[in-house]
Image: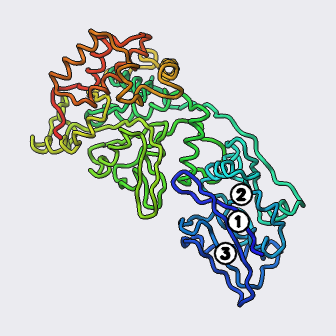
Amino acid sequence: MPGVVHGAVLVGVDATVVSVEVDLLRRLPSVAIVGLPSASVREAAERVRSAILSSGMEFPRFRILISLAPADLRKQGTGFDLPMAVAILVAAGRVPAERAARWMLAGELSLGGEVRPVRGALSIACAARDGGFGGVIVPRPCVEEAALVEGVDVRGVRTLAEAVAFLCGEGELEGASRGAVSRATDALDLRDVRGQEEARFALEVAAAGGHNLLMEGPPGCGKTMLAARLPGILPPLSQSEAVECTRVHSAAGLRSGLGGVVSTRPFRAPHHSVSAAAMVGAADLRPGEASLAHHGVLFLDEFPEFRRDVREALRAPLEDRVVVLARAGGRVVFPANFALVAAANPCPCGYWGHPTRPCLCSPSQRQRYRASLSGPIVDRVDMRVELRPVEPARLFEGPGSEASEGSHAVRERVERCRLVQSARNGPGRTNASLGSDEVLQLADPRECALRELVRHVEKRGTSARGARRLLRVSRTIADLGGAERVETEHIRAAISLRFDSDEEVVP
């Protein structure tokens, strides 16, 4: 009688239940795996054979047929090693079929029978809960991550022999308690930044409302320094946000063996040589940098140096806050609710407009450089500020002479602002995530403020998208100031943060 054990395969960040069926045929000994297995799944036959023998058990001397159902879903990854080994032992009568069928299993096997971590343990536990299984057995390093899912019994296993003993009722496996999100503080402090008051305020607005920010200025004026201190003023993750982040990072294979939950908001800073697949997702349907920055920040330094297809791939995520991948292997939707922070030089040499250093670029070179940022991308940026070099005397002032606030004081204002937004917009919803059909109602501008916005839109020819983004930024500035409604000064402050110079980027 065939042995049946259940595992799971990752499709994006979600896991789909897979039935692992094993039949022993009285033919020449061999192992055949059917059901669209990938190369890593086909190679599992030799790992499973060696793991069973190394665990002191007999490997059946039959033709072993392993079927992975549903057969039309491609199976990939090494998480099927443990369920295939157990299914073989069930078919051989070594493990009770009824008890094995109540559990979902996942784990990679070494040749010696040890169970190694796999990616997506959190998603696998969610699939076990939704599928009505009694529990899930995962590698011991992944048990804390899987235990974040409520309503399912999670057990950790170190070796194949331990799993077999537990399923036979001859031993117990360790569980894990569900941990809470721990609050971590960033070592970098805003107090280290000299000058750049407007950029500091823009950074605070970006952190409070989840807005996109583009900083322009010559090299060494503090763009990267400011961006690196953004995590220090971001509010802590809520429990639900932390679970979502952990699920995405686990599906990408970044949590293997780490266990626990992502405790701080993600801050992703890929190099400008990154490919479009690495930015939004690869052909194997793994999440990219945009999804790894979910509920956090995506920092793109030297923004114009990124390949054009990489920048343009961010259009849809910046607007819809999801990444939709359609490949030959399937179609998946990744979450991508991030705030974009980008830094750019004003020209190829970097010194256009510098007070002391001359620019070596021709007008056509500057025009081409600024035109590399397309109009649709710039239109999706909420704030665009210009940084100037700081006076040398201010760079070497002592700590006591610097009047700027530290990250702790700014973070307290940001947290209060986020609480106001959650009460008005809904739990966890920032002003930047407001839909176009609700931004006017929730921003609640006064008539005079609305007239100011209309005058600006008519004068500058701002798009409808840009006008709504101005209103969202105005709402965040009003929330930081404790105002119930958007006033004229809030609209003007948002305009000053979005258009810092008369020179527009040519699309």
The residue pinned by badge 3 equals: 66
The residue at 76%/51% (across/down) is: 134
Amino acid marked by disc 2? Met
- Indicate the position of residue 18 as horizontal and vertical percent values: 63, 62
Q: Earlier in the sequence, mark 3 or mark 2?
A: 3
Q: Earlier in the sequence, mark 1 or mark 3?
A: 3
Residue 409 can be seen in this image: no
Q: Nearer the viewer, residue 321 or 217?
A: 321
Along the horizontal axis of the image, is 252 left or right of 99? left
Distance of label 3 from label 2 (alpha carbons):
17 Å
Callout 1: helix, strand or loop? Answer: helix
Give the residue furthest to the bottom: 28
Q: Are marks 1 and 2 in contact (CB under 8 Å)?
A: yes
Callout 3: helix, strand or loop? Answer: strand
Distance of label 1 from label 2 (alpha carbons):
8 Å
Amino acid marked by disc 3? Ile
The residue pinned by badge 1 equals: 83
Q: Crowding at label 1, few (<14), some or many (≥20) Cα neighbours within 10 Å?
A: many
Distance of label 1 from label 3 (alpha carbons):
11 Å
Which quadrant, please, contains the N terminus?
Answer: bottom right
Displayed quadrant of residue 326: bottom left
Displayed quadrant of residue 507: top left
Along the horizontal axis of the image, is 480 left or right of 130? left
Disc marking residue 104: 2
- Indicate the position of residue 389 as horizontal and vertical percent values: 27, 28
